[in-house]
Structures are given as structure tokens and as C-alpha cells.
């Protein structure tokens, strides 16, 4: 199922590249456990629209999953503080 989603989203991104579709592609990689690929794709989404909070939030999630603590802090500073952000920080022992 995720393979079909990846194929469809890759095609959609080619036809109409935007931050939302790119973020959805990153989510498919994240859901497959391919965190490095997901990270790269979320960064591509942010390159398209640096204010797209969904891409930034999902990027923070994959950074936490990879225990990339310094880049995680950079991303979390760009987002509103909430309990979920605290849980991501906890993955880095903070």
C-alpha cells in the first residue's frame, strides 16, 4: 500500500510540485521507516514554502526519530511550543 502511495505521490509531485504534495511524499517515506529520505523530502517541501508548518513539524518528528538533536531544536524554535514539541525534545534527553 505504501509503495502505491509513493508512486502516486512521486507522480503528483512531478505534475504539480508544491509543499503540500512534497510533504505527503515525506510522510509516506516516514511511514515506511525511511527517515533519512523523509528528512530530505521534508526539507524540499520547506524549500518550496518555508512557512509550511506541516512540513516543519514532520521534519522535527523524523529528526527526533533519528536523534538529531541540534537540527531538531532549530526546527522546534520555528514552531509554536506545545506538549508534543516537549515529547520530541524528550527523545533527545531534554
Image (cartoon, rainbow, N blue to C red):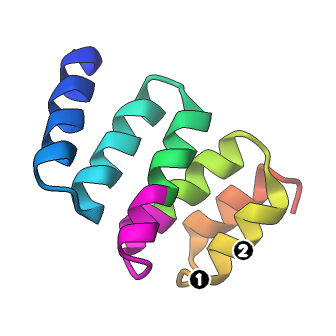
Mark-to-mark CA distance, 1 and 2: 7 Å
The image quarter containing residue 14 is top left
Task: Give the magenta range.
Answer: 44-56
Which element is circle 2 on?
helix
User: What percent of the width, then of the height, locates residue 19?
Assistant: 29, 63
Identify which residue is drawn at 83% across, 64% down. 70
Asked whether 74 falls inside the magenta stretch, the response is: no
Residue 27 percent across, percent down from the top left: 37, 41
Residue 83 image offset from top left, x and y in percent: 59, 70
Q: Which residue is mark 1?
A: 78
What residue is at 89 percent from the left and 54 percent from the top?
Answer: 93
Q: Do the CB atoms of the residues marked 1 and 2 lie less than 8 Å apart?
A: yes
Q: Residue visible at 49% across and 67% down?
A: 56
In the rendered image, the quadrant that contains the C terminus is bottom right
Left or right: residue 90 compared with residue 20: right
In the picture of the structure, the residue carrying the numbered disc 2 is 74
Amino acid at each position: 500500500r505504501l509503495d502505491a502511495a509513493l508512486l502516486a505521490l512521486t507522480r503528483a509531485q512531478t505534475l504539480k510540485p508544491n509543499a503540500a504534495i512534497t510533504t505527503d511524499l515525506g510522510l509516506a517515506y516516514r511511514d515506511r521507516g525511511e527517515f533519512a529520505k523523509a528528512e530530505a523530502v521534508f526539507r524540499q517541501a520547506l524549500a518550496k514554502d518555508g512557512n509550511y508548518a506541516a512540513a516543519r513539524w514532520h521534519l522535527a518528528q523524523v529528526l527526533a526519530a533519528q536523534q538529531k538533536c541540534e537540527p531538531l531544536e532549530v526546527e522546534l524554535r520555528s514552531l509554536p511550543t506545545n506538549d508534543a514539541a516537549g515529547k520530541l525534545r524528550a527523545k533527545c534527553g531534554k
